[in-house]
Image (cartoon, rainbow, N blue to C red):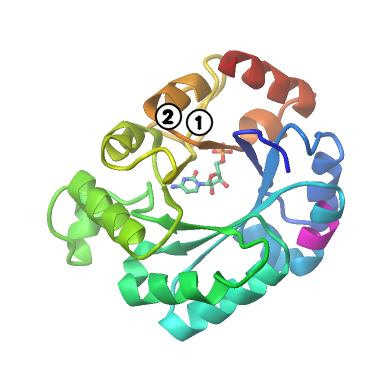
């Protein structure tokens, strides 16, 4: 297993384009994230192919359903041999506990991560669905609930990382998208940090997509980021 903190987001609409990018990367130097678009078009096959190449896979399907349905989905995801999976913490404590229990007997159990609030949520959209309090207080509450339910960590915006790290020890994994190297375009990400800023704030894993996948030489772009982390 690679000890890299970098998870490259494979946001592609076909298995061929995802594999073509993976072929340009070294499995000892990064992990890969397979999300809803790629998984919906290609199914478990893409996970099998990437795993066979030696990559650790974060299967980012953000399960959110009744506890038994989420538990069964987590079990079959674990059987695919992925390294990390996730659920929505808004599914509640019973759902998270069921997910955790469903994979606890797996020999190489994947890390189970909770999505707190999607970074696309604003105070206004939270209010619309009846969530009271500030975004920050909701994120903290959901992360505490994830920890209490036995999850291994949460996905969080880089700007929430520091605060979460003051409440949770290093073994509670903080997985952070919204990362942009200093010289890189922000694309549609608004609240970004550089890789080293996010790591200094307490992030365990950095999810990075376009700054690597859109680069002329993806491996070189990865190396430049690695160098900023030394
Ligand atoms: O290309 P970019 O680096 O912006 O990709 C970030 C990845 O992280 C995408 O796959 C995106 O869906 C995911 N993500 C995010 N913000 C979240 C959760 C996931 O950007 N809150």
Q: Which label number is shown at residue 179?
A: 1
Judging depth in this view, the residue of 193 and 162 nearest the camera is 162
For the stretch drawn in magenta, what is the main secondary structure? helix
Judging depth in this view, the residue of 32 and 40 nearest the camera is 32
**Relative to residue 3, is residue 142 drawn left or right?**
left
Q: Quadrant of residue 41?
A: bottom right
Q: Identify whether 221 is placed above or below 55.
A: above
Assign a secondary structure to mark 1: loop
Q: Is residue 223 visible?
A: yes
Q: Is residue 193 visible?
A: no
Total numbered badges shown on the rendered structure: 2
> Is residue 167 found inside the magenta-colored segment of the image?
no
Q: Of callouts 1 and 2, which one flags the residue occurring earlier in the amino acid sequence?
A: 1
Assign a secondary structure to mark 2: loop
Residue in the picture at 36% in, 40% down: 169
Mark 1 in CB contact with mark 2 (< 8 angstroms) = yes
Disc 1 residue: CB within 8 Å of ligand 1: yes
Q: Identify whether 182 is placed above or below 142.
A: above
| Image coords of residue 165 (percent x, y) | 33, 36
Q: Identify whether 229 is placed above or below 92.
A: above
Residue segment shown in magenta: 46-50
The residue carrying mark 2 is 192
| Image coords of residue 79 (percent x, y) | 70, 71
| Image coords of residue 96 (percent x, y) | 40, 70
Residue in the picture at 53% in, 76% down: 102
Classed neighbour count for the residue bearing mark 2: other residues with Cα under 10 Å, few (<14), some (14–19), many (≥20): some
Classed neighbour count for the residue bearing mark 1: other residues with Cα under 10 Å, few (<14), some (14–19), many (≥20): many
Q: Which label number is shown at residue 197?
A: none
């Amino acid at each position: 297993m690679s000890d890299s903190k970098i998870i490259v987001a494979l946001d592609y609409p076909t298995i061929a384009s995802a594999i073509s990018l993976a072929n340009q990367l070294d499995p000892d130097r990064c992990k890969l994230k397979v999300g809803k678009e790629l998984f919906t078009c290609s199914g478990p096959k893409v996970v099998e192919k990437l795993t066979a190449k030696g990559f650790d896979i974060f299967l980012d399907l953000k399960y959110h359903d009744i506890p038994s349905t989420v538990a069964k989905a987590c079990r079959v995801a674990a059987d695919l041999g992925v390294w990390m999976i996730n659920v929505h913490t808004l599914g509640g404590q019973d759902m998270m506990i069921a997910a955790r229990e469903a994979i606890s007997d797996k020999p190489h159990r994947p890390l189970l991560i909770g999505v707190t609030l999607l970074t696309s949520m604003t105070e206004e959209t939270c209010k619309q669905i009846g969530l009271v309090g500030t975004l920050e207080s909701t994120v903290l509450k959901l992360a505490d609930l994830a920890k209490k339910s036995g999850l291994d960590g949460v996905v969080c915006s880089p700007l929430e990382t520091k605060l979460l790290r003051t409440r949770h020890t290093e073994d509670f994994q903080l997985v952070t998208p919204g990362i942009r190297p200093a010289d890189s375009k922000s694309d549609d990400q608004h609240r970004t940090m550089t890789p080293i800023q996010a790591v200094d704030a307490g992030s365990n894993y950095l999810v990075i997509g376009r700054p690597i996948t859109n680069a002329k030489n993806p491996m070189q772009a990865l190396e430049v980021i690695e160098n900023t982390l030394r």
